[in-house]
Image (spheres, rainbow, N blue to C red):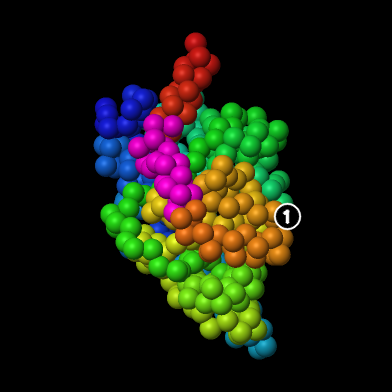
Amino acid sequence: MSGVGVQGWPGGCERVVFFAPRTPETSGGAKVVHTLSAALVASGVPVEHISLRPGSRAAQFPTHVVDAHPERQRRSSFRMSQGWRNRARGLVEVVVKRVDRVRNRARLRRLLQRYGSETALVFSHVSTKIAADETGWKRDGSGPLLVGQHHSQFESIDLEPWLRGAIADHFQDLDVFMALTEADAARFQEMLRPRCVAMPNPVEPSEVAPRTRRPTAVAISRLSGEKAVDVMVRCFAAATRDDALGDWQLDIYGEGDQLDVVRSAIHDSGCTRIRLAGHCDDPYEVLAEASVLLMTSWMEGLPMSILEAAVMGVPAIAFDCSPGVRSLVGEDRGYLVPPGDEGEFTRVLHSALQSPDELARRGEAARARAGEFLPGPVLEAWGRALTSCYELRDERCD
């Protein structure tokens, strides 16, 4: 059996298939799937990907796309409903959409039927399990292990009205459900029958060596509402009005629908040392000379940017918004601030920037913690979880 490079990997698991809404792309969830996939392949475990929609980048692993033309479903069939010709075209388009949906479901069902007990089928988001269930596919006793995931904190399931119900309805037949922390797993266990375990996201090791630290704070974040980067801008501007901190700058890496909001916040702050740096291709290169990472999110899972900063020995200042953030930044591995308290964030940031030696000490503590999230230890935890699933299946068969 392959997989001998992973200590404790179950002998019956010869393939892992990740089913994602869209892969490959640049989101945090897609990055986790890529990191896990690369580590598994390097350890001798074959990997395949299923993507509901085409990814935005070139695939690096065997990838099956369920809906190659999602724009057809999004497009209105009756954009121009005046006149019988336009109405006829609209009706034809409705038929084409329905045929597409039937074909896509049939294609996905045939694909899922290929996998037997030698496969661990991982649903990286509940939307992919919904797609599988809508095909009418049901695995039997010899089918693949079913693994569900949620890549954010438990409370995030109430951000979208449909999400809590979808998880409760579609994840009940799993072999195991993976949450990011023990606290999140305990909350999910209250609503799910399958065993819920804590399984952290892995972080890629860095090939970039840290360099001389500069008076630079960094944010690597999607510019969306829950990230509250405009709050970060205000806090940084207020914290560095002190002449002694006049050489500090803030580089904000990321893109998103709140770009104009963040740009306006920078303008309104009057601080000329805040820079919108665009997309970040290599976080480790960005962090190599940085002194601190800033995060003002009010909702997070197990943030990859904090983990990547920790790998480089860079501590984070963050709102204490989730068990995942707490587990990474707590115990003097960074600075935790009460959620949403801009005044306290400003005060902590002002104090931290005046203490480079303390920043460095906390950065080293963060680096020591980050070792637990490298692919090796995380894959061993996956091996233990999947082994338990196979053992439970064998007990049921007996």
Q: Position of residue 263 (x, y in %)?
A: 58, 81
Q: Is residue 297 magenta?
A: no
Residue 364 seen from this side: yes
Please tell me which residue is depicted at 42% across the width and 47% down the height of the picture.
364
Residue 219 horizontal/vertical position (percent) = 50, 65
Is residue 165 rendered to the left or right of residue 286?
A: right
Judge whether 78 appears above or below 141 on screen: below
Magenta-drawn stretch contains 376: yes
Q: Nearer the viewer, residue 158 or 274?
A: 274
Chief secondary structure of the magenta portion: helix
Say above or below: 143 vs 216: above
Tag 1 residue: 161
Give whichever of 245, 52 is nearer the camera.
Answer: 245
Task: Pick the residue in front: 150 or 114.
Answer: 150
Magenta residues, start to end: 360-381
Q: Residue at x 70, y 33 (%)?
A: 190
Identify the residue shown where x is 32% and y is 61%.
Answer: 211
Which residue is at 50% across, 28% downward?
Answer: 140
Quadrant of the drawing holding the N terminus:
top left
Give the residue type at disc 1. Answer: Pro
Q: Quadrant of residue 55?
A: bottom left
Q: Position of residue 295 (x, y in %)?
A: 57, 61
Residue 136 horizontal/vertical position (percent): 56, 42
